[in-house]
Image: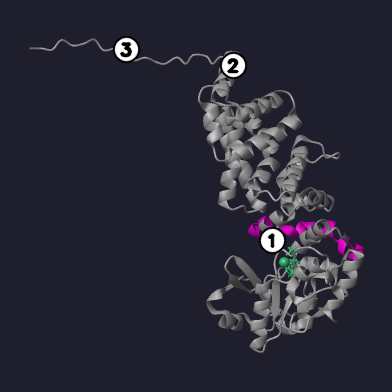
Amino acid sequence: MNASHFNIHPQRFSRNALTVVDKLQRQGFEAYIVGGCIRDILLGKHPKDFDVATNARPEQIQQIFQRKCRLIGRRFRLAHIMFGRDIIEVATFRASHSDALGEHQAKRNDDGMLLRDNVYGNIEQDAERRDFTVNALYYDPQNNTLRDYFNGIEDLKAGKLRLIGDPVTRYQEDPVRMLRSIRFMAKLDMFLEKPSEQPIRELAYLLKNIPPARLFDESLKLLQAGQGLKTYRLLRQYGLFEQLFPALVPYFTEKGDSFAERLISTALTSTDERIADKLRINPAFLFAAFFWYPLREKVEVLKNEGGLNNHDAHALAGTETLNLFCRTLAAPRRHTATIREIWFLQLQLQKRTGAAPMRTMENPKFRAAFDLLMMRADIEGGDTVELAKWWHEFQLSNGEQRTQLVKEQQRLHPQPKKKYFRPRKRPKQKPTE
Ligand code: ATP
Ligand code: MG
């Protein structure tokens, strides 16, 4: 159908995506702009990225784009065409996995999950293996036409998310589709039709089959896309949050008001606000907040039962908590290092005498640590509120005022004088002549 009916014309697409389509078509291949970007443009939103689908095989794409092209993926082979920092993802049309012909190339595990998905096909088959009807839209800029194989445009107008095919099978093939259902509900403010919604609770456990590195990427897309709080609530509602964060399950309450749950909500709200204000966000901060109270509980156990001092207990509890977290979501090392630093700084923030405050403030992660302290103050009240106020004032003060603030602390909390063991002086020996 003619795309101009929907106020769609080539100028609304990325120039790089248009270049890729044009080059492929000039070489005699079919090529379309496809997927979420068309859905977003129809909704009047700015697409996050542009994807292209073609009947050219990955090797043929490589030949056309040469050094601009990188082939990636095992489960799903793709070509990335690079334009500086902008990347256009080009996927070869794929066939439905039930295609008996392709059975040897579409491997499944015992839970029905697809381990490889490299059965090539034509455009109709490609549309069929996409997840949602609203994501199976193809745009040809050459003649400004749209192809809509499953009434995606109608669903989009009705605000309805509908999986293509049998929902149970589609979730079994790729359990991440359950997370995508939640993500699109929150991001697009659409509802999930009953048959696509109903099996999720029962199939949520299938996420255990997904590699932790992929789940980590998905969890960022879920929680750091501007609708974190809403997404979190939906994940809880559908029993998916506990699959991503099993270590947090003991902190779930009916009212959702345990310290841990309140900190999760506060951290997500603040992340959403920062995204709305176009400020930078740091995934480490979010996860440091998620696990702060579970960490604190572990620290207490290690101190009481293991006889460790506060510092050692924190270090050990930090390692154990991060190991548990990474078992389901494999966070890259740079993130876990930052999470650890933010936790460690919660201890440093307690020290308000001598040179400690200035040293703490110079730490590159001070800002994130202070933000966490502020959130904790809201939840814990009492001494934490006083501590957060003090740091707030300390930051706003000049050098002289800071010295006063530190002196006052020294007066309020005098440190016991450290007793040094002084070695006995050896009696001087008379030089013998
Ligand atoms: P966004 O870019 O806003 O996250 P999107 O729909 O573009 O949303 P991508 O992950 O960029 O999502 O994927 C591009 C397209 O590839 C989708 O629109 C969909 O057609 C298809 N797709 C992606 N992931 C899957 C999946 N797990 N199963 C089936 N089809 C998928
Ligand atoms: Mg996309």
**Which numbered marker is on residue 430?**
none
Q: Are marks 3 and 2 in contact (CB under 8 Å)?
A: no
Q: Which residues are magenta?
A: 192-216
Q: Quadrant of residue 311?
A: top right
Give the image location of residue 256, x and y in percent. 83, 40
Instruction: Identify whether 265 is placed above or below 146.
Output: above
List the residue tagged with mark 3: 424
Ligand 1 visible in quadrant: bottom right
Q: Identify residue type, mark 3.
A: Arg
Disc 1 from disc 3: Cα separation: 65 Å
Residue at the (58%, 83%) spot, across then down: 64
Residue at the (59%, 16%) spot, across then down: 408
Q: Main secondary structure of the magenta part?
A: helix
Q: Is residue 355 visible?
A: yes
Residue at the (67%, 33%) spot, across then down: 373
Q: Nearer the viewer, residue 380 or 111?
A: 380
Q: Identify residue type, mark 1.
A: Ile
Give the image location of residue 366, x and y in percent. 59, 37
Q: Is residue 56 visible?
A: no
Disc 3 from disc 2: Cα separation: 37 Å
Between label 3 and label 2, give the one nearer the viewer.
2
